Image (cartoon, rainbow, N blue to C red):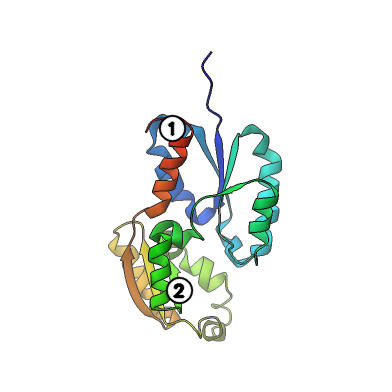
Amino acid sequence: MANVPQKTLIIACGALAKEIVFLKNGLGLAGDLIDLQCLPADYHNRPDKIIPGLEKVIAKMGADYGRILIGYGDCGTGGQLDAFIKNNNLELLPGAHCYAFFAGLDEFDALMEEELGSFFLTDYLVKFFESLVMDGMGINKNPALRDMYFANYKRVVYLAQSEDEDLQKQAEAAAVTLGLEYEYRFTGYGHLETAIKDLAIKENVHV
């Protein structure tokens, strides 16, 4: 009897859900070997919830998978997430965080070297800017927080996965709201696409 490839579980930030599902579905049969479970995107504002959230998913679902990948960077955990991944023999999707997933580490590092005070947006963060940034960070309730949070920022960089004019307008409006300069960079799915395809190949399925 032929060996049946073991399935892989990706546990990721909800901000990556749409992109991972799109890429997974584009793999045909290979995509059937990859399942996705996302934690709420607003955990970016409550990083203390990330590790307990991962623990809960792994306890509930982990035994059903031969491999578990984590779609997070440090995300404000102060190194605790790296320690958790190491102690539990888990793997990271390549990239320091969702911005590097899309832009690539070299390009992201270049953007940061060019201007350290860069605030990044993705398609998801543009769509949910009000709920995740303005409401999530308490700025709508207390406008003075905007200047406190963003005092050291100079620009908004929209790392776009899609060439959507409406999203571009929303991103530019977000920059105005934050009182920052605006730049647009189209990345597509970047290194996230490569990582998902490489994952399928490693599971011995041709795509």
Q: Which mark is residue 30?
A: 1
Looking at the image, which residue is at 53% across and 38% down? 35
Location of residue 8 in the rendering, given as x and y in whole percent from the top left corner: 55, 37
Q: Is residue 88 above or below residue 109?
A: above
Q: Residue at the location (43% across, 30% down)? A: 205
Determine crowd level at label 2: few under 14, some 14-19, many 20+ residues with C-alpha closer than 10 A: many
Q: Residue at x 66, y 38 (%)?
A: 61
Nearer the observer, 83 or 177: 83
Relative horizontal placement of residue 184, taking residue 197 as reference (left or right): left
At numbered mark 1, what does the secondary structure look like: helix, strand or loop? helix
x and y percentages locating residue 101 in the rendered image: 44, 56
The image quadrant that residue 184 belongs to is bottom left
Q: Is residue 20 left or right of residue 54?
A: left
The three-letter code of the residue at mark 1 reads: Ala
Image height of 119 relative to 80, above or below = below
Question: In what element is the residue under mark 2?
Answer: strand
Rendered location of residue 64, percent (x, y): 64, 32
| Mark 2: amino acid | Phe
Q: Residue at 45% x, 36% y: name it.
A: 200
Question: Can residue 53 be seen in this snapshot?
Answer: no
Circle 2 residue: 119
Q: Nearer the viewer, residue 60 or 116?
A: 116
